[in-house]
């Protein structure tokens, strides 16, 4: 079965940078979408960034201009480069993979904590 392992979170000062990674294993379809979501305490989970297997991207408003999503299809890995971090970016960040056509399959990582604080 498909498994996602996301990592790279930690404590960073405002204005700093972090790079999150997510490695997918198992039966990964050649056509899929990989995303990063985040959830802050007391808030709903929100989309941060999305990338398709052919490289098309889109970003949530909070990420535009500061975050960059990328992927290595050969390694089934997706990255999220986060720059100019703000305290409001503090959240648990989750990797997500969606694949399938007639039946859509969704898979989630366990999450990695990002804490932006002085």
Image (spheres, rainbow, N blue to C red):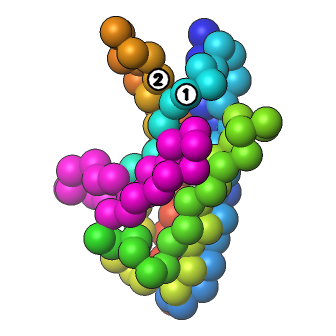
Q: Can you tell which of label 2 and label 1 is closer to the viewer? A: 1
Locate residue 78 relative to residue 102 in the image: left or right: right
Q: Is residue 103 magenta?
A: no
Of the pair 61 and 58, the residue shown nearer to us: 58
The residue where tag 2 is placed is: 99
State how many labels appear: 2
Residue 9 visible? The answer is: no
- The answer to the question of whether label 2 and label 1 lie on touching residues, with beta carbons closer than 8 A, is yes
Q: Which residues are magenta?
A: 39-60
Q: Is residue 44 magenta?
A: yes
How far from the left and from the top, in percent, is residue 42? 20, 56
Quick one: label 1, few (<14), some, or many (20+) residues within 10 Å? Answer: few
Quick one: label 2, few (<14), some, or many (20+) residues within 10 Å? Answer: some
How far from the left and from the top, in percent, is residue 82? 56, 72
Tell me how far mark 2 sits from mark 1, CA to CA. Answer: 7 Å
| Residue ID at (44%, 28%) | 98
SS class of the residue under badge 2?
strand
The residue where tag 1 is placed is: 31
Res. 97 mark = none
| Residue ID at (51%, 72%) | 67
Residue 20 visible? The answer is: yes
| Residue ID at (66%, 49%) | 71
Taking 75 as reference, is 9 above or below it?
below
How far from the left and from the top, in percent, is residue 36? 46, 50
């Amino acid at each position: 079965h498909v498994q996602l392992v996301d990592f790279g979170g930690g404590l960073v000062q405002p204005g700093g940078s972090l790079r999150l990674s997510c490695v997918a294993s198992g039966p990964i379809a050649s056509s899929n979408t990989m995303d990063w979501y985040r959830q802050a305490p007391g808030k709903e989970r929100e989309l941060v960034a999305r990338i398709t297997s052919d490289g098309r991207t889109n970003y949530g408003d909070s990420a535009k201009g500061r975050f960059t999503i990328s992927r290595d299809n050969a390694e089934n890995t997706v990255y999220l480069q986060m720059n100019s971090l703000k305290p409001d970016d503090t959240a648990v960040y989750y990797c997500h993979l969606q694949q399938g056509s007639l039946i859509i399959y969704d898979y989630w990582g366990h999450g990695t904590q990002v804490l932006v604080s002085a």
